Image (tube, rainbow, N blue to C red):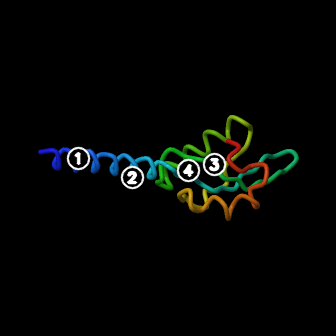
């Protein structure tokens, strides 16, 4: 009985760890402001790893700061953060 209970507890802990890892979703995007024209590339944490849902979330957050989303380039996990940090500069995880 103890082995079964231990196995179930272990399985539950593994499942929680997998769910937490699945929540780490990020999107890289391009945005603009007009008058004068300004462009930027950025990286933002998003709540969904689906590109369509991420597109809506990124556009909404940028709109609050006067930016217009041009496109979401990709949606990725935490493993892709380091290679995008230098290119995003001040817009790395800003919004």
Kindly identify which numbered label has been placed on residue 18: 2
CA separation, marks 2 and 1?
Answer: 19 Å
Relative image position of residue 38 (x, y in whole percent): 83, 51
In contact (CB < 8 Å): disc 1 and disc 3: no
Relative image position of residue 78 (x, y in whole percent): 56, 56
Name the foreground residue: 19 vs 87: 19
Name the foreground residue: 53 vs 86: 86
What residue is pinned by disc 4?
55
Q: Secondary structure at mark 2?
A: helix
Neighbor class of circle 2 (other Cα within 10 Å; few <14, some 14-19, many 20+) is: few
Neighbor class of circle 3 (other Cα within 10 Å; few <14, some 14-19, many 20+) is: many
- Is 57 left, or right, of 22 in this rendering? right
In front: label 2 or label 3: 2
Q: Residue at x 65, y 55 (%)?
A: 29
Q: Residue at x 46, y 54 (%)?
A: 50
CA separation, marks 1 and 4?
Answer: 42 Å
Rendering quarter of residue 39: bottom right
Precedes in sequence: disc 1 or disc 4: 1
- Is 63 left, or right, of 21 in this rendering? right
Kindly identify which numbered label has been placed on residue 6: 1
Kindly identify which numbered label has been placed on residue 44: 3
Precedes in sequence: disc 2 or disc 1: 1
């Amino acid at each position: 009985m103890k082995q079964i209970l231990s196995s179930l507890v272990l399985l539950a802990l593994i499942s929680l760890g997998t769910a937490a890892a699945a929540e780490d979703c990020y999107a890289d995007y391009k945005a603009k402001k007009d008058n004068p024209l300004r462009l930027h590339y950025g990286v933002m944490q998003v709540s969904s790893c689906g590109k369509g849902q991420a597109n809506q979330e990124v556009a909404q957050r940028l709109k609050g700061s006067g930016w217009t989303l041009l496109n979401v380039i990709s949606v990725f996990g935490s493993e892709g953060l380091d290679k995008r940090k230098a290119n995003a500069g001040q817009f790395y995880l800003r919004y």
